[in-house]
Amino acid sequence: MTGRFISLEGGEGTGKSTQAKALATALEGRGLKVHLTREPGGTPGAEVIRELLLSGHDEKWNMRTEALLFAAARSEHCGSLIKPALERGEWVISDRFVDSSRAYQSVSGLLSDEDIMALHSVGSENLMPDRTFILDLPEEVAARRADARDRGDSDRIGGRDSDYHRSVMAKFRQYADEEPDRVKLVDASQSPEDVTANLLQNLTDLIG
Ligand code: TYD
């Protein structure tokens, strides 16, 4: 038996963590065994890499190092948590996964999508989610929510300028266009309950 792997993606302040929790609760309510996890992080080793990645000044790492560190954290996460859970037939919900690397680490133009996927191949044998939800919000609303949460203390990547974050969101929307079976764009401006219902609706084929 193989479990199912769901990732939630989107910009800062779109409600991914809230939705990941709500979705896990709803699926557990249907009797499924669910692991709720996040990237970067999710295992002790990957959480150490998370701290390296998100703390300090933007100039601390160049874009190549940054992409390698995300791939290294993901390798740990896939190898010791996600793959074993899927092999046991359990569900995994990850707050961010490789589409975040494809979007955030390729914006500078230094690394291509092929480069990011090559790192993913080496690190994680190209494991892909069965379904990916991109939580989509108008830019001003997302920025307001992220500011309210971070109160001027955003992390190394969240603190990048609005042009950067706009380009990241454009990449996410592009993935939904390119891979409509796997990647679903979800309107995150609805009430949290309505967003969760929308996610569940888009999982009926996987729940069986
Ligand atoms: P986090 O606080 O978990 O995200 P959020 O702001 O969505 O709550 O911070 C993770 C940051 O790392 C976020 O700015 C996105 C970024 N990131 C990448 O740049 N590449 C990646 O592969 C991943 C997983 C995250």
Image (cartoon, helix red, strand yellow):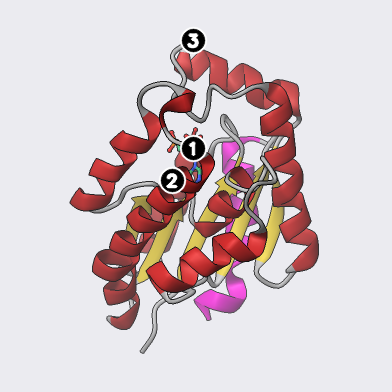
Residues at discs 3 and 1 in contact (Cβ within 8 Å): no
Could one spot residue 166 in this view of the protein?
yes
* Identity of the residue drawn at 65% across and 69% down: 182
Can you name the residue that lies furthest to the top here? 152
Disc 2 versus disc 1: distance between alpha carbons?
Answer: 5 Å
Tell me if the residue at label 1 has its CB under 8 Å from ligand 1.
no
Q: Which residues are magenta?
A: 191-208
The residue indicated by pointer 2 is 65
Query: Which tag is nearer the camera, tag 3 or tag 1?
Result: 1
Amino acid type, residue under disc 2 in the picture: Thr
Amino acid type, residue under disc 3 in the picture: Gly
Going from N to C along the chain, the mark reached first, 3 or 1, is: 1
Residue at disc 1, secondary structure: loop
Q: Within 10 angstroms of label 1, few (less than 14), some, or many (20 or more) residues?
A: few
Residue at disc 2, secondary structure: helix
Could one spot residue 39 in this view of the protein?
no
Tell me if residue 195 is in the magenta stretch. yes
Disc 2 versus disc 3: distance between alpha carbons?
Answer: 26 Å
Query: Quick check: 53 above or below 102?
Result: above
Amino acid type, residue under disc 1 in the picture: Asn
Residue 190 x %, y %: 69, 37
Can you name the residue that lies furthest to the bottom here? 1
Tell me if residue 101 is in the magenta stretch. no
Going from N to C along the chain, the mark reached first, 2 or 3, is: 2
